[in-house]
Image: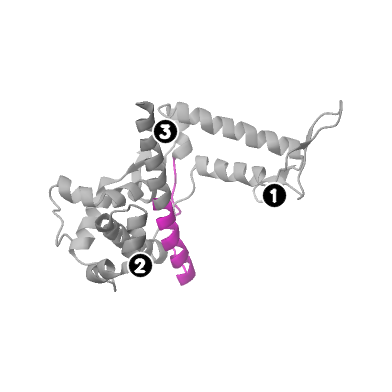
Amino acid sequence: MIDKFNIETDIPEENELLDYVIQLMGEYCPYIDYDYDIGEFYSDRSFNPASLYTFKNRYNNYFGIYFTYDKYMSDLDIQNTLKIRNIDSEKFWYLLLFIYDYCNGECTSGYRCKKSSREELEDLIRAIDDNIKGYDYKGNKPFRMKSDKELKLTLHIDNKQAFTIKNPDTLFFISLFCNSCLIESEKLDSNSFYKRMDHRSFEEFSSIESNSYFIYFFASMFVKFLSLILNLKLRKERIQESYY
């Protein structure tokens, strides 16, 4: 365990121990820039180096945590679980500190980050696809999508209902076209138009969350990290397979 991080200079050996932290920072501490064309702040998928500096500085000045490194390393349940999942326990310690500190900031005086267009489209696609159960097709009759629930997509303008879609066929095509757009955006992620899909903005006022949300958010960050690790391992396996 490092006693103090070097603040003035990035030392490769120190940053290697922060590998898990850096990976998760790409999701929760993205690089923020300002788009002068639209007059908004936005984020991309890379982590903000300033966030790493903040973490190191707060580590050096003590987080105020109630658990210790020795207690963490001597907990056999934790260490055995990490070993089974092939997770580096030393790197995981710094990840634990980062998540704990980040949750404190997010749930007591943080500014909520709104979802990007990509995330909102993914949520819409998922909501439609999870509730459309295939289609009816009999003889020469045209197909119709079906659902065992009433589906409705409503557009409000100035808090007044302006347009509503209830037809499962139309909702199915919306999901299909949105998904095609997301796939296309992955191919053209260097295009400035498609980059807008990953832009996020921030709410104007800070907020204080309940303890139950703190617990939920704390757990969700670990789940997100595990999914990142799993995806990274899958990509490495595919690269290795391509050599054979």
Mark 3 nearby-residue class (10 Å; few <14, some 14–19, many ≥20): few
Quadrant of the rendering where the C terminus is positioned = top left
In this rendering, the answer to whether 185 lies above or below 198 is above
The amino acid on which the numbered mark 1 sits, given as a three-letter code, is Lys
In this rendering, the label closer to the viewer, 1 or 2: 2
At 49% from the left and 30% from the top, the residue drawn is 185
Disc 3/disc 1 C-alpha distance (Å): 30 Å
> Could you tell me the amino acid type at mark 2?
Asp
State the extent of the magenta-drawn residues as a range. Answer: 199-225
Residue with the mark numbered 3: 37
Cβ–Cβ under 8 Å for marks 3 and 2: no
Q: Hey, what amino acid is under mark 3? A: Asp
Instruction: Using the numbered discs, state the Cα–Cα distance from disc 3 to disc 2 in whole angstroms.
Output: 52 Å
According to the picture, the residue beneath numbered tag 2 turns out to be: 77
Instruction: Indicate left or right for 155 with 208 as reference.
Output: right
Q: Outermost residue, front direction?
A: 244
Residue drawn at x 14%, y 60% as measured from the top left: 4
**Dot 1 alpha-carbon crowd within 10 angstroms: few under 14, some 14 to 19, many 20 or more:** few
User: Disc number at residue 172?
Assistant: none
**Up/down of 12 relative to 104, above or below:** above
Considering the numbered disc 3 on the image, is that residue within a helix, a strand or a loop? loop
Color encoding of the figure: one colour
- Helix, strand or loop under label 1: strand
Mark 1 or mark 2: whose residue is earlier in sequence: 2
How busy is the neighbourhood of tag 2: few (under 14 within 10 Å), some, or many (20 plus)?
few
- In the displayed structure, does residue 201 sit left or right of residue 2? right
Between 81 and 44, the residue placed more toward the observer is: 81
Residue that label 1 marks: 160
| Residue farthest along the bottom direction in this orientation | 66
Q: Choose the circle earlier in sequence order: 3 or 2.
A: 3
